[in-house]
Image (cartoon, rainbow, N blue to C red):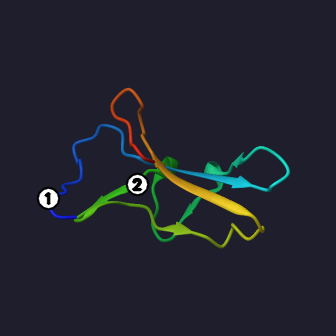
Amino acid sequence: MIGHHPVTDLMSPPVLQVSYDSGTSPAEDLSDHALSAGQGTEGNQFELVVDGWQFNLQTRNYTALRTYTVKMVSGDGSEYVIEPS
């Protein structure tokens, strides 16, 4: 996007949130099971790179059929909000 500049001066980096909808119960939060492909960060935090924020999600643990939802959410809701996530 032309003219787009990522916000880089955050005290709390954005974090990854993963949920699983089995179709028979409320969506289950699987964020604690998210694994980064490579080095990774503590607490599912995104890493700041040249072009903005990134999280290289390892998907091998997500093999069940149905719907997984992955969101980028604020690391501190009192500092900033990500809309849409």
Local crowd size for mark 1, using a 10 Å CA cut-off: few (<14), some (14–19), many (≥20): few
Cα distance in 3D space between marks 1 and 2: 22 Å
**Which quadrant is home to the N terminus?**
bottom left
Q: Which mark is residue 3?
A: 1
The part of the image, by quadrant, that contains residue 75 is top left
Question: Measuring 40% from the left and 54% from the top, which residue is drawn there?
Answer: 46
Say what secondary structure mark 1 lies in.
loop
Q: Position of residue 73 (x, y in %)?
A: 46, 44
Q: Position of residue 23 (x, y in %)?
A: 81, 55
Q: Is residue 34 above or below residue 61?
A: above
Q: Position of residue 59 (x, y in %)?
A: 61, 70
Question: Measuring 67% from the left and 51% from the top, which residue is drawn there?
Answer: 30
Q: Which mark is residue 36?
A: none
Q: Nearer the viewer, residue 83 or 43?
A: 83
Q: Nearer the viewer, residue 70 or 54?
A: 70
Q: Amino acid at mark 2?
A: Phe
The part of the image, by quadrant, that contains residue 10 is top left
Q: Nearer the viewer, residue 53 or 4?
A: 4
Q: Position of residue 83 (x, y in %)?
A: 39, 43
Q: Which mark is residue 46?
A: 2
Residue lying farthest to the left in this orientation: 3
Of the two numbered discs 1 and 2 on the same chain, state the one appearing first in sequence: 1
Say what secondary structure mark 2 lies in.
loop
Local crowd size for mark 2, using a 10 Å CA cut-off: few (<14), some (14–19), many (≥20): many
